[in-house]
Image: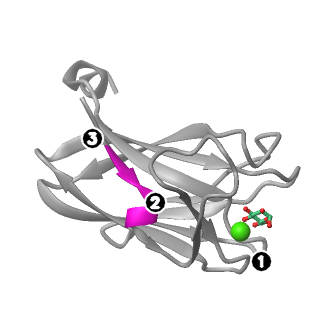
Amino acid sequence: SSTRLEAENAVCQGTVDSDHAGYSGTGFCNTTNAVGASVEWTVNAPTAGSYTLGIRHANGTTVNRPMSVAVNGTVVAAAQAFPGTGAWTTWQTVPVTAALQAGTNTVRLSATTALGGPNIDYLETTARPAMAVALE
Ligand code: GCU
Ligand code: CA
């Protein structure tokens, strides 16, 4: 099973907007167009282990808007790519794999360029199957 955490309920460094259709919940986080612009979720994981962090986003430009991904303050992806999705109303989910601890975690995305991040809709966490992890 998966847990969806809407970006409009996270700490959004920017504005919570709803002017581009197709988002989940009541809106999305429009990060400020600046280096370091961030969105941070508090994630409660039922058990420690490897999780897929699905990041739903839209980028209506043709230019990549990379963000670093940090879990509990440790960078797990230094420059996760968020290329153009074709339109601000076209939302896609990018998967990042990371370990979560049981209980409270923080997942923070931070823009690494002056373009800021894409618009961020939600974070969806899914525990990875034990067999997939064992085969790594
Ligand atoms: C437009 C768009 C915003 C987006 C912004 C950007 O203003 O409407 O949703 O966040 O571009 O380039 O970051
Ligand atoms: Ca923006």
Q: Of helix, strand and loop, which one carries label 3?
A: strand
Identify which residue, 61 or 47, lies in the foreground: 61
Q: In which quarter of the image is the C terminus?
A: top left
Mark 1–mark 3 Cα distance, whole angstroms, equals 31 Å
Q: Exactly how many numbered labels are in the figure?
A: 3
Q: Of helix, strand and loop, which one carries label 1?
A: loop
Within-10-Å neighbours for mark 2: few <14, some 14–19, many 20+ = many
Mark 1–mark 2 Cα distance, whole angstroms, equals 21 Å
Q: Nearer the viewer, mark 1 or mark 2?
A: 2
> Which badge, 3 or 2, comes first in the chain's sequence?
2
Q: Is residue 53 above or below residue 129?
A: below
Q: Quadrant of ligand 1?
A: bottom right
**Which label belongs to residue 50?**
3
Within-10-Å neighbours for mark 1: few <14, some 14–19, many 20+ = few
Counting from the top left corner in percent of width and height, residue 21 is at 66, 45
> Would you say 120 lies left or right of 43 here?
right
Magenta residues, as a range?
A: 4-9
Q: Name the residue under label 2.
A: 7
Q: Name the residue under label 1.
A: 114
> Would you say 39 lies left or right of 21 here?
left
Q: Residue at x 35, y 73 (%)?
A: 73
Q: What residue type is labelled 2?
A: Ala
Q: What residue type is labelled 1?
A: Ala
Identify which residue, 114 or 118, lies in the foreground: 118
Q: In this view, does 47 lie above or below 102?
A: above
Mark 3–mark 2 Cα distance, whole angstroms, equals 22 Å
Counting from the top left corner in percent of width and height, residue 80 is at 61, 53
> Which badge, 1 or 2, comes first in the chain's sequence?
2
> Would you say 136 lies left or right of 60 here?
left
Q: Which residue is drawn at 41% across and 54% down?
A: 6
